[in-house]
Image (spheres, rainbow, N blue to C red):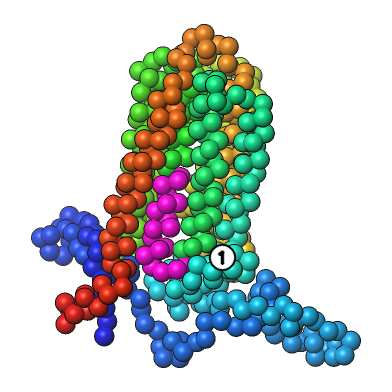
Amino acid sequence: MEVKRRVFPVWRGIGASSAVGWSQGWGRCLRWEPGSQERGSRIPVFDYPVWLLFCRRGRARLREVCQRGRGAIRLPTDLLNLKLPQLFDIHQVPMVFREDSIISGYRHPQSSAMDCVLSSFQMNNETINIWTHFLPTWYFMWRFLALCSTMNFLNDSYTWPLLVYMLLICIYPFTSSCAHTFSSMSAESRHICYFFDYGALSLYSLGCAISYGYYVMPDCWVNSWLHQHFVLIAIGNSLFCTSMSCYSRFVELQFPKRSKALRTGAFVVPFIFDTVPLFYRALICFWGGGTPSDALSSHCYHLLFAFLTCFLFTAHLPERLAPGRFDYIGHSHQLFHISAVVGTHFQMEGVVADMMSRRAWLQLHGATPSFLGTIGALAVSVALNLAVIGIFSAPLLWKSRPGSAQQHAHREQ
Ligand SMILES: [Zn+2]
């Protein structure tokens, strides 16, 4: 018996099929498509030695090596026999787990939390996604601690925008890494994991706005209306970004293109808003024939990587050109992570350089950063974004309660 779960309405568009534009589309996102009997009887664990999991067809290669060098080579297979989760191909996992042009290397769609943690050491199509954001988290933490030792974040209010920015560039890759790790526990957990990922990214956009508003703003815009309302508008943008990107997951299966457009738009809007002062400064500098400062050069490198990040996110290259070839290494999401992190590195360098070099001028002319405009804005945004994530997650958590599926099945009979 098929169990349909209806949780959240999905906008189908004006004039779609009936007079009512909203449909109950979550069912399509959450429904597990039962595989064939043969697929269902697969054993979820196997005995591959750990290192063999790092290459495709590793088991066959091991057997070949053992046969060729019989007696001469003794591999420590018993020692390395760890039970790691089996991997699946695209047609073996539910629709909601499928990635465009990624054919193999999927984890079990109902993995345990331990399986998910173990899977970060096993080569699958998420492994590099996990590490390309986990390792940079430590890099940014290291840079943050180094700044803590040279700056007085506690008492010097001029450093608070940088404090907020540094906190958020540590949080967003860490959240993303966790989201990629635990996204294969269930369809519901996958959605919720990515809700947090989007929330952290939109808070990062707020961190950019706070640091740009105080350190990067062009001289002629300091104390303007935009300067005074920059952080407030950025809080609104972060809420828009989280809501829109979370909502895009609801329409992903029915309208993949619309979903992609919504999600891309959700992140592009705060990016453009945050970057307007920087664009203006770069334009003045290049048109005026001035020599770009070190800070502006770093900002320009950041912009370059930001465009590359956006391109990789939307284009799904190179895997679209050769589906299945880049499942484990080299697909667009990994490149997107790397490009985002390199861009953030340059952005951080630019922000720190501006902060140091413009201090005297900004303190003389500009408003001194207030607690409310920096740490307060962050606290309010964290609370509001968590509330948005809660609103989107609640129906999923409600539906994933044990027994709710039975109730639905009962109702639909
Ligand atoms: Zn990611």
Q: List x then y, in percent, for residue 89.
A: 51, 77
Give the extent of the magenta segment: 184-201
The residue drawn where x is 40% and y is 30% is 376
What residue is disc 1 on?
117
* Secondary structure of residue under mark 1: helix
Q: List x then y, in percent, for residue 408.
A: 21, 75
Vertical position of residue 76 compared to residue 180: above or below: below
The residue drawn where x is 43% and y is 87% is 40
Quadrant of image for the N terminus: bottom left
List the single residue furthest toward the front. Answer: 154
Taking the magenta stretch, the answer to whether it contains residue 223 is: no
Residue 106 is at least partly visible in this image: no
Quadrant of image for the C terminus: bottom left
Q: Which quadrant of the view contains residue 67?
A: bottom right
Residue 392 is at least partly visible in this image: yes
Q: Is residue 25 left or right of residue 58?
A: left
Q: What kind of residue is marked 1?
A: Val
Of residues 72 and 374, which is closer to you in this image? Answer: 374
Q: Is residue 13 left or right of residue 74?
A: left
